[in-house]
Amino acid sequence: MGYLYLALAIFTEVTATSALKASAEFTKLGPSILVVVGYAASFYFLSLVLKTVPLGITYAIWAGMGIVLIAVVDAVLYKQIPDLAAVIGMSLIVAGVLVIHLFSKTIGH
């Protein structure tokens, strides 16, 4: 169940961060509410994850996947395409998350 909560935490964080730009520095009500609610939901789901997954592993996956998914959303919604160095760096982040998930004995499989 921990990884379901982690997926929800990542999704709500990505949603909130994506709405951050649309909030226009919190001058637009709808996106501003989405930012606050999204981050609150993300941290709530993170707290549930920590019942079964170690903090360091949780944070590494949450932050790493958030970075990559925000870059994808940014490219699609705002047409801000990352350059080659950014793509390589994000590929390394994904590789790190996969190594943790597939090979770490710290997490329960």
Image: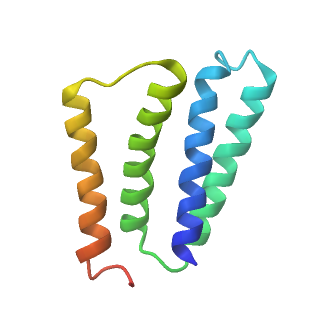
- Residue 5 as seen in the image, left or right of residue 75: right
Q: Residue at x 65, y 15 (%)?
A: 24
Point 40% across, 41% down: residue: 67
Residue at (38% x, 84% y) in the render: 109
Res. 50 in view? no
**Residue in the foreground of this view, choosing between 91 and 49:** 91
Vertical order, 59 against 77 (above or below): below
Count how many numbered circles sit on residues in the image.
0
Query: Residue 86, can we see it?
Result: yes
**Residue 20 screen position, x and y as percent:** 61, 27
Residue projecting furthest to the front: 76
Residue at the image point whose x is 55% and y is 78% from the top:
51
Residue 13 appears left or right of 62: right
Q: Is residue 20 above or below residue 91?
A: above
| Vertical placement of residue 62 versus 47, above or below | above
Q: Is residue 96 above or below residue 53?
A: above
Q: Quadrant of the N terminus?
A: bottom right
Query: In the current view of this chain or complex, which residue is farthest to the right?
Result: 29
108 left or right, relative to 84: right
